Image (spheres, rainbow, N blue to C red):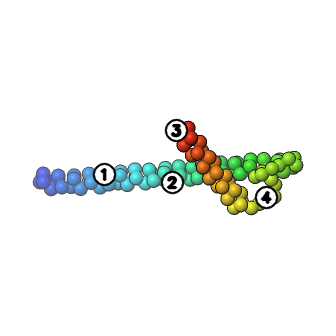
Amino acid sequence: MSNPLLQAFFVGRALGEVVTEKLEYALTDALSELGKWDAEAREQMRSFTEEVTERAHRAAEAAGSSGTTTGYGQAGSGDTQAIIDELRAEIALLRTELQRYRSNSVS
């Protein structure tokens, strides 16, 4: 290759191919690591959720077996939507009382 223009063309072409391959490998590795991290995070969240659920279940069983349960801790209450509705009603009542208290203390 005695023509410098032709040599520059082939060098530029080879450079472009090598850079493209390196970027391809880097992107593939980054996406692979991201996938691994996502899978690990999901597994940790699942494990955490199971642990919380298990502890809540054990606490509910212990409270139910003692015979002194009241309110939401009762074993066999089972109607989750009713409990949620009751809690929402209590929250609304507390918000109203809090607003009333704040308005009286500002005046």
User: Residue 69: in sight, yes or no?
Assistant: yes
Residue in view at x 60 percent, y 49 percent: 96
Q: Which residue is mark 4?
A: 77
Of badges 1 and 3, the one in the foreground is 3
Of callouts 2 and 3, the N-terminal one: 2
| In this rendering, the label closer to the viewer, 1 or 4 | 4
* Mark 1 residue crowding within 10 angstroms, few (<14) / some (14–19) / many (20+): few
Q: Is residue 64 above or below residue 102?
A: below
Give the residue drawn at x 64%, y 51%: 93
* Label located before the other in sequence (2 or 1): 1
Give the residue at mark 1.
19
Quote the CA–CA distance across marks 2 and 4: 41 Å
| Mark in the foreground, 2 or 3 | 3
Q: Is residue 27 left or right of residue 97?
A: left
Q: Earlier in the sequence, mark 4 or mark 3?
A: 4
Q: Is residue 29 left or right of residue 36?
A: left
User: What is the number of the mark on residue 106?
Assistant: 3
In percent of width and height, residue 12 lies at 22, 53
Q: CA distance from mark 1 to mark 4?
A: 65 Å
Mark 3 element type: helix
Is residue 40 visible in the rendered structure shown here? no
**View extreme (front): residue:** 107
Q: Which residue is mark 2?
A: 35
